Amino acid sequence: MSNEELNPASCQTAVRRSALSRSNYMRKVVRYYNGEDDWKYKCIDTYEKVKNAQAWELCPNCGLFPKVWEFDNGRATACGCGENQYEKFTVFAESIMSVCKNSHNGQSAIDYDLDALRKNWNHWAKTGEFLFTRGNGRW
Ligand SMILES: [Zn+2]
């Protein structure tokens, strides 16, 4: 898989959803689900498309909807930003397994926020700041 020479990773343009016409925006949604932009993503194949793309902001730098991956210790996003699939831009959230492990009795998911990753991504996309970052050595 070598799209490096095709991928203009260095020419990033700021993209705002509000700057797109309705039809251009819908075209992006369709491209996302058809996988037409898959080659632009800097991530391994375990990242999956989100179920409701329109609830997720576009990356303000590469203009893509994020893909997401939940693994043992966290949840993470991937878009077209970064050097390669290992050195890439990511927004994180805690995973359900990690929440359980760190709960008062080691098995409670009561503090788990299914939507935490989307909230963190959307907040970052709008403001450039994270609601929370991977921290405390917990996840
Ligand atoms: Zn991006």
Image (cartoon, grey):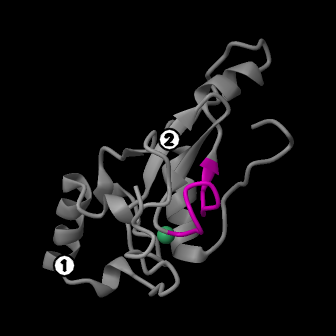
Quarter holding the N terminus? bottom left
Q: Which residue is mark 2?
A: 69
> What secondary structure is the magenta-colored segment mainly?
loop
Task: Tell me: residue 84, above or below residue 98.
Answer: below
Amino acid type at circle 2 is Trp
Amino acid type at circle 1 is Asn
Dot 1 falls on a residue whose secondary structure is helix
Q: Nearer the viewer, residue 87 or 89?
A: 87
Task: Tell me residue 67's x, y (percent).
Answer: 42, 52
Left or right placement of residue 74 versus residue 67 in this view: right
Packing grade of label 2 (10 A; few <14, some 14-19, many >=20) is: some
Specify the label residue 94 is tagged with. none
Left or right placement of residue 41 versus residue 38 in this view: right
Packing grade of label 1 (10 A; few <14, some 14-19, many >=20) is: few
Task: Tell me residue 109's x, y (percent).
Answer: 62, 21
Q: Residue lying farthest right? A: 136
Q: Residue at x 66, y 63 (%)?
A: 130
Q: Nearer the viewer, residue 7 or 16?
A: 7
Q: Which residue is mark 1?
A: 24
